Amino acid sequence: MSDPAKPVPYLESIDIGMNADYMTADQRFAARRPDVAVWQTAPLEGDVTVAGPIGVHLSVSTTGTDADWVVKLIDVWPDDVPVEPWEWTPRNAWDEKPARSKLGGNQQLVRGEPFRGKFRRSLEKPEPFTPGKIDTVAFTMPGVLHTFRRGHRIMVQVQGSWFPLVDRNPQTFANIREATEGDFQPATHRIHQGTASPSHLVLPVIPDERP
């Protein structure tokens, strides 16, 4: 359920102005929300390096006539990350070094990109969704150069808003600049999977050629 009155924020904290920390911020606060869909791999058996643009192919439907699709690629750190020396400064002679780092379980944002659904076929000629009908939203996320380390997980989150980085979509087919309060309506967005509706991301992985 995506509700324009309760948009998914870009950060867990409240700040004045735009905080650049969102580009690598921990996304656990978003994963806990019922309006954010989450998938993740098992712990990786080896390093995985992604270099280049990321392809997004979603089979979707909505009960509204417009929808935003925000896709986030995330690096999930293991829960038992050891404390690095630079992370710990003793406060006194009796201060004991913690066993685990605060980065344990961190869901580090690697790349996030929104797509306004009504432009899925053309930027010049927007089209409404037919409520309940499965449609395709495909786009390319900006390139990355990132290594997911052994033991980490690759996570994908999909959500219908990213406020205030992206203006709220009323989720009715309207000119947002002219939208009235009544145009903003909750809607149920669905991401379909399976053979007939294979939603997926395409990651440009560099092969590990080490012996």
Image: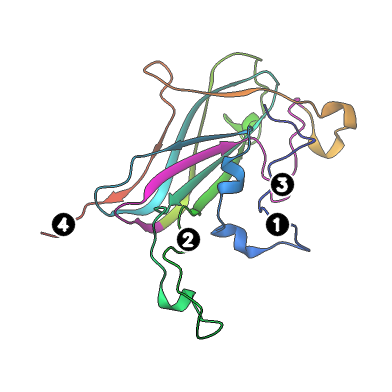
Query: Does the magenta run of residues contain 169?
Result: yes
N-term-proximal mark, 3 vs 4: 3
Disc 2 secondary structure class: loop
Q: Residues within 10 Å of mark 2 (few under 14, many from 20)?
A: some
Residue located beneath label 2 in the image: 103
N-term-proximal mark, 1 vs 2: 1
- At horizontal 66% and vertical 51% (from top left) the residue drawn is 10
Q: Residues within 10 Å of mark 3 (few under 14, many from 20)?
A: some
40 vs 129, left or right, is left
N-term-proximal mark, 4 vs 1: 1
- At horizontal 44% and vertical 43% (from top left) the residue drawn is 155
At label 1, which amino acid type do we have?
Ser
N-term-proximal mark, 1 vs 3: 1
* Magenta range: 145-173
Residue 119, x across and y down, in percent: 62, 33
Eyeballing the image, is 93 above or below 44?
below
Of the pair 203 and 35, the residue shown nearer to us: 35
Residue located beneath label 4 in the image: 209
How far apart marks 1 and 2 lie (CA) works out to 17 Å
- At horizontal 67% and vertical 18% (from top left) the residue drawn is 63
Residue most toward the left?
211
Q: Quadrant of the C terminus?
A: bottom left
> Which picture quadrant has residue 60?
top right
At label 2, which amino acid type do we have?
Leu
How far apart marks 3 and 4 lie (CA) works out to 41 Å
Residues at badges 4 and 1 in contact (C-beta under 8 Å)?
no
Camera-side mark, 4 or 2: 2
Eyeballing the image, is 142 above or below 132?
below
Residue located beneath label 3 in the image: 163
Residues at badges 4 and 2 in contact (C-beta under 8 Å)?
no
Residue most toward the front?
94
Residue 182, x across and y down, in percent: 88, 26
